[in-house]
Image (tube, rainbow, N blue to C red):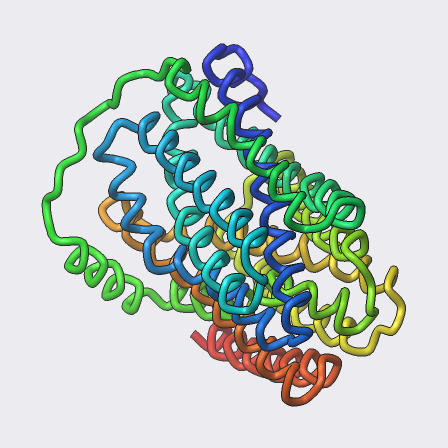
Amino acid sequence: MNLSAFKSQPFRHYLACVSIALHGMWVQRLVVVWLAWDVSNSPAFVGFAAFLSFAPTMITGPLFGVLADRIEIRLAIFSNYIVMLIITLSFIAVAHTYVINMITVAIFSAAIGIVASANHPFRMTMAARLGNKEQLSSIIAITTLNFNLSRLVGPVIGGILISQFGPIQTLWVTSVGFLPMIFLIQKISIRPRDTQAKIEQRFSDALKEGFLFTKKEPFLLYVFGLTICVTVLGRGLLETLPIIAQGVFKSGPNELGLLTAGAGAGAIVASFVKAFGKPQQKGKIGSLGALCSILVPISIIMIGFSNNFFLTLGIVVLLGFVVTFFATTMISAAQLQLTDEFRGRVMSLWTMTAMGGGAIGALLLGLMSETFGISATFIILGGLTTLIIAIILFFARSN
């Protein structure tokens, strides 16, 4: 891996601050899904809460991406963490004053979902301006790895804190984690923008052109079709792990933290494999994407039949690897197919598809688990998704 990013002092300072903040955000995410089950004992509500925290990224993510190109990025990140801190402290105050119920948990989940949808484009925009152009690929690789490391460690810390101190007290820790970013972000120097962003056309028109371009390209339709299948099932499950931890195994926050960390561990391995692997041609990328897409529903079916926690944990690690490897592989496939004219627009459509699939999948898994039972839902959805993927691969091969 290229480590030239560490030669940049601003990047080193930023990485230290954002690492603490990201760990806090993953602990906060674990608290939300834990509370969703705790107040309801309902798979449907867990799925609904995950939907509320995930769906805003699909709707507002591209808008915040445009905003990140047009305002002072350090001020944007400062404001983002201030709002996140206010929301967290407000929920803590409500928890100490009133009884926590499904309404308050749903509002909290939706609020942090909206703020988190701005956090990713703001962070990535900031990171890209912390070094020179030769260091850019290194900066992107290290920030991605840092995100996945926090995804691994944060839930483990969260599970321990929840089991020892309770979910509300744990939120105090996440609040402290936001403080370095709030107090130090303005002191980190960044390079000037290369160009000042201009609005050349309405956002809706640009998005429409990207959609029409995608519609005309068979390989892109193949990429988007597989992405919908993988994110609805794979990402949907990874966002509703309390259904497995508490609904199937009747376990506590430590086990939920382990499952969440297991998905993060798989994602880290996938990131390393992609970082150190050789670049692939489009045909090879398409084959790898097909293999990953088939492994997702097979993993879900295996979880449906599993009655052993550690076997399920191993499958979740595999699922975390496959979903992450699929996402990075499909992005590479799409990038090889795109011209610079449509690259940004098609990539924003892909992001909306991936985020929307995860949100819909979480809601679908929750509602079906409530109606048909958890194991039956996993087996049914896994089987149906396998059939749909087989049909997509058949038509892709025919073309």
Q: Is residue 108 left or right of residue 31?
A: left
Choose top left, top right, bottom left or bottom right for residue 142.
top right
Q: Is residue 278 above or below residue 392?
A: above
Q: Is residue 391 above or below residue 268?
A: below
Q: Residue visible at 76% across and 65% down?
A: 245
How many numbered dots are placed on residues in this image?
A: 0
Choose top left, top right, bottom left or bottom right for residue 322.
bottom right
Q: Residue visible at 19% across and 60% down?
A: 209
User: Which residue is more in the foreground, 206 or 243?
Assistant: 243
Q: Is residue 93 left or right of residue 162?
A: left
User: Which residue is more in the foreground, 396 or 9?
Assistant: 9
The percent coordinates of residue 37 (x first, y second) are 66, 67
Task: Give the residue furthest to the front.
Answer: 97
- Location of the C terminus (image quadrant): bottom left
Q: Residue visible at 12% across and 53% down?
A: 202
The percent coordinates of residue 116 (x first, y second) are 44, 47
Q: Is residue 219 left or right of residue 315?
A: left
The percent coordinates of residue 253 (x first, y second) are 76, 55
Task: Give the residue furthest to the bottom.
Answer: 372
User: Which residue is more in the foreground, 193 or 332?
Assistant: 193
Q: Is residue 245 left or right of residue 330?
A: right
Q: Quick check: can you spot residue 284?
A: no
Q: Residue visible at 52% across and 48% down?
A: 93
Choose top left, top right, bottom left or bottom right for residue 218.
bottom left
Q: Quick check: can you spot residue 220?
A: yes
The percent coordinates of residue 94 (x first, y second) are 51, 53
- Location of the N terminus (image quadrant): top right
Q: Is residue 384 above or below residue 160?
A: below
